Image: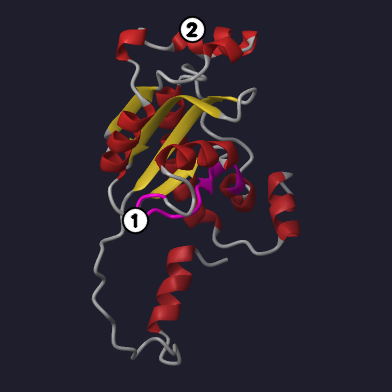
């Protein structure tokens, strides 16, 4: 099976490629970088943001805790597993401040990655203005690392040894997983058959 890079090279080099002789236009905006992130939130209160951590592929990180979440609606699990890990309240920030800092941190046209990303994506875009009114150049999706793992047929991911439910530590692990899966993608190649995926996962 050809790797992604091999398949793309063959496509680009093929003389029958209809795009081969098309005059290329200059790209106005450079593609942004990959960013892995994680949100901690309250599912008992409309996915209200508690904390967020982001890691860019260049290694730079961002972390913030909202000072606007309703503490009266926290359940015992959140208190024990999330709130207990937060920094002092003096360091918490308003949602508007977090929004401005994240937009600056992410830059133009970022590519987002998260693990089981559906809720994280909703929380992030609720913070920055919504799906339709988000920052210019931002994608309307977050790529799901769990789905990427499934489609590549990878049985096990690198272990996260500590920092579970600390948004920044989870985001760091997400970036580790992204890098791991990206390397595995070149070994596995493109898979379009779900049966092939299942066989790989079962080691057949």
Tag 2's secondary structure?
Answer: helix
- What is the spatial separation of the Cα atoms under label 1 and label 2, in whole angstroms? 36 Å
Count neighbours of disc 1 (C-alpha within 10 A) and say few if under 14, some if 14 to 19, many if 20 or more: few
Q: Nearer the viewer, residue 151 or 56?
A: 56
Q: In this picture, which residue range is highlighted in magenta?
A: 134-147
**Residue placed under numbered mark 2 in the picture:** 84
Identity of the residue drawn at 43% across and 31% down: 171
| Display colour scheme | secondary structure
**Occupied quadrant, residue 196:** bottom right
Task: Tell me the quarter of the picture where residue 122 sits.
Answer: top right
Instruction: Report if the CB atoms under discs 1 and 2 are less than 8 Å apart.
Output: no
Along the line of sight, which residue is nearer the eye, 101 or 188?
Answer: 101
Q: In the rendering, at what x and y percent does residue 145 appear?
A: 54, 43
Q: Answer whether residue 5 is magenta in the image.
A: no
Q: Report the mark closest to the observer, 1 or 2.
A: 1
Q: Is residue 201 left or right of residue 49?
A: right
To which residue does mark 1 refer? 136
Query: Could you tell me which quadrant the N terminus lies in?
Result: bottom right
Q: Who comes first in sequence, dot 1 or dot 2?
A: 2
- Can you tell which mark lies on residue 145? none
Point out residue 127 in the picture as x, y percentages from the top left corner.
Answer: 44, 37
Q: Residue at x 48, y 7 (%)?
A: 84
Residue 193 occupies quadrant = bottom right
Q: Position of residue 39 (x, y in %)?
A: 48, 30
Determine whether 98 is above or below 4 in the image: above
């Amino acid at each position: 099976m050809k790797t992604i890079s091999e398949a793309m090279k063959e496509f680009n080099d093929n003389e029958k490629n209809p795009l081969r002789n098309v005059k290329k236009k200059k790209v106005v905006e450079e593609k942004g970088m990959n960013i892995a992130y994680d949100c901690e939130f309250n599912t008992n209160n409309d996915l209200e943001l508690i904390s967020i951590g982001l890691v860019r592929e260049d290694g730079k990180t961002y972390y913030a805790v909202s000072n606007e979440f309703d503490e009266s609606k926290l359940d015992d699990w959140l208190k024990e597993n999330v709130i207990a890990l937060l920094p002092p309240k003096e360091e918490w920030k308003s949602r508007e401040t977090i929004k401005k800092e994240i937009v600056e941190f992410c830059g133009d046209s970022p590519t987002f990655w998260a693990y089981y990303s559906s809720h994280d994506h909703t929380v992030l875009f609720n913070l920055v203005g919504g799906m339709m009114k988000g920052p210019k150049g931002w994608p309307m999706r977050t790529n799901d690392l769990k789905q990427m793992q499934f489609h590549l047929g990878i049985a096990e991911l690198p272990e996260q040894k500590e920092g579970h439910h600390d948004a920044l530590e989870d985001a760091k692990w997400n970036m580790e997983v992204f890098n791991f899966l990206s390397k595995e993608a070149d070994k596995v190649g493109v898979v379009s058959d779900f049966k092939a995926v299942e066989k790989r996962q079962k080691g057949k």
